[in-house]
Amino acid sequence: MRVREIALRVLRMPLVEPFETSMERTTERLILLVEADVDGVIGWGECVAGETPSYSPETTETAWHILRDFLWPLIRGREFASAGEVWELFGKVRGHLMAKGALEAAVWDAEAKLKGIPLWKLLGGTREEISSGVSIGIKDSLDELVATVRKELAAGYQRIKIKIKPGKDFEPVRRLRQDFPRIRLMVDANSAYRIEDWQLLKQLEGFYLMMIEQPLGWDDLYSHVRLQKKLETPICLDECIHTEEHARAAIELGACKIINI
């Protein structure tokens, strides 16, 4: 296999409604797509970097730069047996995992098309359907939040995750558990709290949450170890986990019980 050429495309996509987290309020997305020609077959990959470096150090613009000026030169003209070999070719570039993942995904997509099988089968998947949950942004009112959850449940989503931040945490969770006592409910703070806030987070345990996602600093494993010892509710880490090594360290240190990829 050989990548003949790649094309980078940015799509500007207004959201149907704003999506607010503890970090920012988003009304429009800039989506970077990678189009890769692999042996004459086109594969597509999407870069998950955001418009600003609030969630991750990577952005749409940094990913474009890294893909064009560093990753493409490393893979151009190289022969490889499968998409599984592509990641190692990027070894000279430290970090920039979202940019790397976008180009790698495009090659995986092309390989699946070349072999005439679905991508999920090529990756080793066995199930044709999986249950799905939905992430709901911070709302202006509790009534609006309840209405959004009701709509998503009616659409078939089986898990509800809501974004929280200081001042919009306890009451939204209390209201949802009151109105929907049986739903699978979880929260995501996107690093909005400090270890000193552990007693507030402890209060959320009375609402039988599946998990509390990334409550503390985006790169602070140590404080999450301390917090998990104080909570029965599983901590889920997201922003803290960049590599397999990070995941192994988080689990073995006891910083979390769940990892979100």
Image (tube, rainbow, N blue to C red):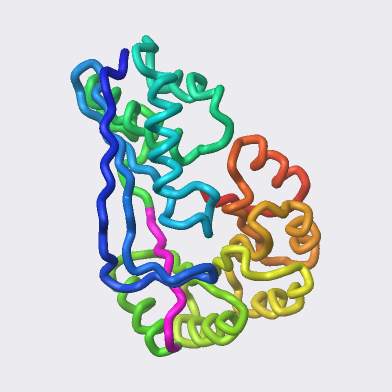
Say if the magenta span includes residue 136: yes
Is 165 displayed left or right of 47 in the figure? right
Is 174 displayed left or right of 135 in the figure? right
Residue for point 71% across, 79% down? 200
How many marks on residues?
0
Residue 155 position (above or below residue 57): below
Is 105 displayed left or right of 6 in the figure? right
Quarter of the picture containing the N terminus is top left
Of residues 26 and 141, the one drawn nearer to the viewer in this rendering: 26
Of residues 206 and 72, the one drawn nearer to the viewer in this rendering: 72
Residue for point 58% across, 75% down? 165
Outermost left residue = 40
Magenta highlight: main SS:
loop
Percent coordinates x, y for residue 122 in the rendering:
35, 27
Percent coordinates x, y for residue 152 in the rendering:
33, 71
Residue 63 position (above or below residue 196): above
Residue 99 position by quadrant: top left
Percent coordinates x, y for residue 156 in the rendering:
31, 66
Residue 32 position (above or below residue 38): below
Residue 160 position by quadrant: bottom left
First to last magenta residue range: 131-141
Is 152 displayed left or right of 165 in the figure? left
